Amino acid sequence: MKVPILIPNIFDHPFTYDSNSLNLDKGNYVIVPFGSTKITGIVWDKFEKAEKKFLIKKIEKKLDVPKMRGNMIDFLNWFSIYNIVPIGMCIRLTLLSKGAVENIPENSFNQYQKLNRNLKYKLNSEQEKCLSEIKKKGNKFNVHVLDGVTGSGKTLVYFNRLREIINRGYQALIMLPEIGLTTQFKKRFVDFFGFEPAIWHSATSKKNKKIIWRGIVEKKIRVVVGARSSLFLPFAKLGIIIVDEEHDASYKQDEGIFYNARDMAISRGSFEKTPVLLITSIPSVETFNNIIKKKYSTSKLNKRYQDASMPNFEIINLNSKKISNKKWIANETMEKVNHHLQKGDQVLFFLNRRGFAPFVICKKCHNKFLCPNCSVNLNYHKSKNFLLCHYCGYKNNLNKICKDNKPCEFIMCGPGVERIAEELEQKYPDKKIRIFSSDTLNKKKTSEDLIEKIENKKIDILVGTQLISKGFHFSKLNCIVVVDADFSSHGYDLRSAEKNIQLYHQLSGRAGREGSSSTIYFQTYTPDDEILLNISKKDPHQFLLNEIELRKKNKLPPFYRFISIIVTGKNEKQTINEALKVKNRITKDIEEEI
């Protein structure tokens, strides 16, 4: 009997194989010969039409793995068409590098087993109301937005909803925008539920991924906490998808296979006929527009948990403040920081630039160090003494010889977090200062150690990038200094204003979470900037209403769609010519602006 087998490769169709007398159904995992190798494939739901006769190879083995469910197959077929991705590449997202997993020792799942645990966290009346509204939406597909101010206890609300779902025998997926969030989140999860969630992201070891993958298809793992890639795990009985920080731009995959994980999570929920819960402190424009149109329902948390007060905001106008030579922090800012340090507060200096300097120039030969792949400035990382492209990861050493064979004289332009940390170490030699960025949290042990030290007040001053704004809970952090509030506020990205409102709103939520008085200081040369004014009013939803009208008026997303066709090549002139040919050809067929 002929059987269509889809393999995890770049092909956009299944291949025909002989069943070899095996009893096979759609979704079964099999081993098939492909070229000179053997590969894991999946029995698919349709044949590729072939006009020519060809030799049909035999399936070698049916794997002892529960078959992929029809809902998942339907989702992957749709995902392939919607995102213009070969269907073979789509199933590659669902399989491990060596295919499906057959045998895992039973005791490998012990840490993920559900335990009965007495609840020690009580919801306040506002949280109870939100939980009730979420439960009323039922267990069929729907999209509900839990919108709450930072520190309002949104996690406790959806933990209670999650507990009910897994008690009914279902599985759950919780998506987080950043790998760095999983360490502290896991601790909070274990504290509430008494068992571990399975953690799934690019840094998860191959050994653990095998255990988790098998545990998911056998329903021995109930809860997965993961980044974008966790969306494609083959759950046996998925009961809810929760997208935390739904507004975060990190959910957009912009290399390899392009997709928006938040939107795809909603689509998977639709195919699985299961509810999707979006969590946010300030919705994305797209989500807010869907709330207005009644496509999504919503619940609001307006107060912080245990009535903790929101932080105060203070603008430090750099036009009238003194900054010492070759320094980046104003004297007035330092005075305010001293006051907080004397009270025993932790202090965060925020600058969304990794490394020491955003770009380097040679004073003698005027050479700029650019990425050969991206044509953007290379960032200098002093801690490792190399130049790094923050887009593609290209690395290079500083070339210390000028074009005229003389020693270079470098100018490090602008500050990164390393430079700010160096300035603070000179100012506060007796304080414990650490950098909090993806460069310092790139290993599990390093991440856990740093977070534990912050929680136990063993670090006085943090210097962090946007990573620290995302969901962390540091009880003693009561002072935040935004070193450069003008950075990225203006630009050509249509979402720059939205991203900055969300970033600073999230950042402010890290301060004063235990009820202590807290303040956010914004260093800026543009004190009348609309973004800063919106933040200080503590009413981001008014910004969203204005932004929606602006987008509608100017024919921008989510009311219109943009298509980007990227032409790449090794020869710049030839690539430009080919891009112009593509433009001219499209212009003949459509009337839209190109």
Image (spheres, helix red, strand yellow):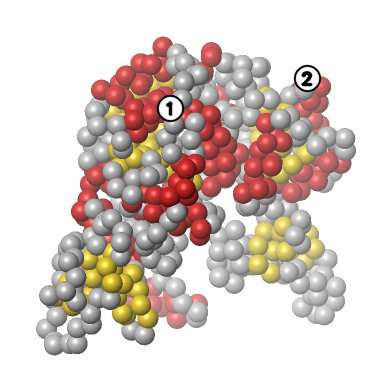
Q: Residue at x 47, y 49 (%)?
A: 108
Pick the residue in front: 111 or 212.
Answer: 111
Give the image location of residue 553, x and y in percent: 32, 40
**Residue drawn where x is 38% and y is 66% of the image:** 99
Image-based side of 181 in relation to 299, left or right:
right
Mark 2 surroundings: few (<14), some (14-19) or many (≥20) residues within 10 A: few
Amino acid type of the residue tagged 1 in the rendering = Asn
Instruction: Give me the residue at 74% from left, 42% from top.
Output: 434
Q: Nearer the viewer, mark 2 or mark 1?
A: 1
In the displayed structure image, the side of residue 169 where residue 416 appears, left or right: right
Q: Quadrant of the N terminus?
A: bottom left
Which residue occupies the foreground of this view, 111 or 306? 111
Specify the amino acid type for callout 2: Lys
- Which callout, 2 or 1, points at the residue further toward the start of the chain? 1
User: Is residue 309 among the parts visible in the rendering?
Assistant: yes
Name the residue carrying label 1: 116
Provide the secondary structure element on which disc 1 rests.
loop
Numbered disc total = 2
Q: Is 474 drawn above or below residue 92 in the view shown?
A: above
Q: Secondary structure at mark 2?
A: loop
Question: Which quadrant of the view contains residue 381?
Answer: bottom right
Residue 508's mark? none
Residue name at image x 34 percent, y 40 percent: 171
Q: Position of residue 543 (x, y in %)?
A: 43, 30
Q: Quadrant of residue 2?
A: bottom left
Measured as percent of width and height from the top left, residue 442 is found at 62, 52
Q: Which residue is mark 2?
A: 343
Q: Cβ–Cβ below 8 Å for labels 2 and 1?
A: no
